[in-house]
Image: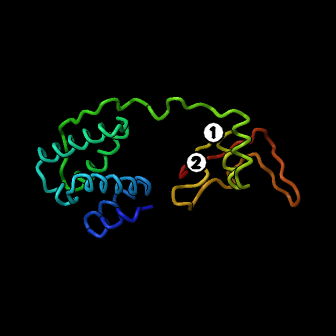
Amino acid sequence: MVEKKYATLLEDKDVLRWYQNVSRGAQSTADVSLRGLGRFCSMTGISPHEVASMSEKQIVGLMLDYVTTLEKNGKAGSYIESCLKPIKSWLLFNGKEIKRRIKIRNTRATTTLRGERVPTQEELRKIFLSATKATRVSCVLMAQSGLRPEVLGDYLGNDGLRIGDIADIEISKDRVTFTNIPARIIVREEL
């Protein structure tokens, strides 16, 4: 889902072609990449075409300044690394490959996972009781089976887990039974 402030970038035919090319791999990656390129251009005050027309030395200088700014703003190394990917993708699309290494501190540190823990039974109960019936089903499936959100519904909401994906379920006119407990859930390749 492209944010309004970055959608204007798609008015440029070359940016649109790049975006469509990236989306052939995954729509979510294309949207994240467009936002990333948009943030970089906004922060530097330079258009995507201006970036693509610069020398490698100028681009690397801009990217180093960008990394420094993000570090000063307290961003995690893994986040900063992900911010450079859309820029490199845009440049590669324009026939420019950045070969110089841009060092980023702590790219493997999982700062966002620090302090994360499994919710208690009481916390799960509160989550379940505060949710709608449909949301409860999603929460239960993720909490009790380990399914990821993408299995329950894809990025655009066009596909997701179906009753037919539950291998051990039997549905008759007035009853639902399981031939095996816990039931096996078949996660289709496209999910």
**Which residue is located at x 53 percent, y 52 percent?**
190
How far across and how far down the image is residue 25, in percent?
A: 40, 54
**Which residue is located at x 18 percent, y 53 percent?**
95
Quadrant of the image containing the N terminus:
bottom left
How far across and how far down the image is residue 185, in percent?
A: 68, 45
Kind of element beneath mark 2: helix
190 sits left or right of 42 in the view: right
How far across and how far down the image is residue 97, in percent?
A: 19, 46
**Which residue is located at x 77 percent, y 49 percent?**
169
- Front residue of 63/93: it is 63
Mark 2 vs mark 1, CA separation in Å: 9 Å
160 sits left or right of 43 in the view: right
The dot on residue 128 is: none
Q: Are marks 2 and 1 in contact (CB under 8 Å)?
A: no
Kind of element beneath mark 1: loop
Residue type at numbered disc 2: Pro
Q: Residue furthest front?
A: 73
The dot on residue 149 is: 2
How far across and how far down the image is residue 103, in percent?
A: 24, 33
Q: Which residue is the site of mark 1?
A: 146
**Which residue is located at x 73 percent, y 34 percent?**
121
